[in-house]
Amino acid sequence: GQNIDQPTEMTATEGAIVQINCTYQTSGFNGLFWYQQHAGEAPTFLSYNVLDGLEEKGRFSSFLSRSKGYSYLLLKELQMKDSASYLCAVRGQTGANNLFFGTGTRLTVIP
Amino acid sequence: DTEVTQTPKHLVMGMTNKKSLKCEQHMGHRAMYWYKQKAKKPPELMFVYSYEKLSINESVPSRFSPECPNSSLLNLHLHALQPEDSALYLCASSQDNTPGEKLFFGSGTQLSVL
């Protein structure tokens, strides 16, 4: 089975830094994705980690520790448009094409 | 063209109706997916097609019937649905089954079952 947990809601101030955590227990592991989803819209890809460590892409960074079953998404210089849900998703067994999503974290950026 | 197109955007149907959701991509992707998303919940995997063959069915009730006519098209046929099936239905595609391949999502069909 798959168990992927994230905080339900977070609030942060414009210009600040926020870290969204994700813990997972899955049958097989072939990478972890972060997606952003604005209300009423499709999820859009943010980052992918398969090896331990930090991946940086502009204002967004994502970290993975496979031994701990843990990842985080770091958002810097927050902007109002970053208010959205952030979904952690894990790909399980190789070749199975499966991608399972966590509970999602609804981030609200306030002035 | 990096889009996944879903039609219709909105659908209202009765419990005795038969309807179909359509999904199309022209990125040459060989894996296509159906997800169901209830309000304020994450997407839940329903079906996966890989190279036009059904590779995953996540124990979805038979009132949902997927079909992949060719590598660019994915349909979801609906029959005798229940009100609790009301949700946003998302289609996605990826290049293939390589683990690092990201999914591209369509904007979804918002389904209401009366």
Image (tube, coloured by chain):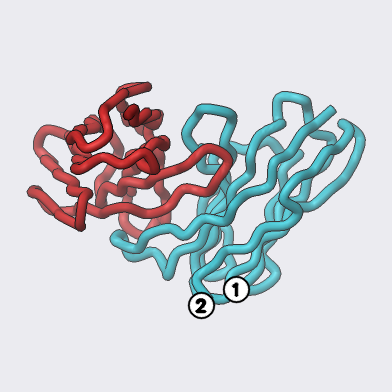
Chain colours: A red, B cyan
Rendered location of residue B32, percent (x, y): 54, 61
Residue located 71% across and 24% down the image: B84
The residue indicated by pointer 2 is B28
Residue A80 lies in quadrant: top left
Label 2: which secondary element: loop
Residue A58 lies in quadrant: bottom left
Residue A97 lies in quadrant: bottom left
Viewer-proximal residue, A59 or B104? A59
Type of amino acid at the residue the image marks with label 2 = Gly
Rendered location of residue A79, percent (x, y): 31, 41
Tell me how far mark 2 sits from mark 1, CA to CA.
8 Å
The quadrant of the rendering that contains the C terminus of chain A is top left
- Name the chain letter of the residue that bears numbered label 2: B
Assess disc 2: are there few (<14), some (14-19) or many (≥20) residues with their C-alpha within 10 Å of its C-alpha. few
Left/right placement of residue B19 relative to residue A75 reads: right
Viewer-proximal residue, A51 or B63? A51
Rendered location of residue A46, percent (x, y): 32, 52
Residue located 76% across and 53% down the image: B8
Residue B112 vertical position relative to residue B33 in the rendered view, above or below: above
- Name the chain letter of the residue that bears numbered label 1: B
Q: Which mark is residue B71?
A: 1
Q: Is residue A1 visible?
A: no
Rendered location of residue A15, percent (x, y): 22, 37
Type of amino acid at the residue the image marks with label 1 = Ser
- Lower sequence index among marks 2 and 1: 2
Left/right placement of residue B40 relative to residue B11 reads: left
Residue B67 vertical position relative to residue B29 in the rendered view, above or below: above
Residue located 39% across and 45% down the image: A36
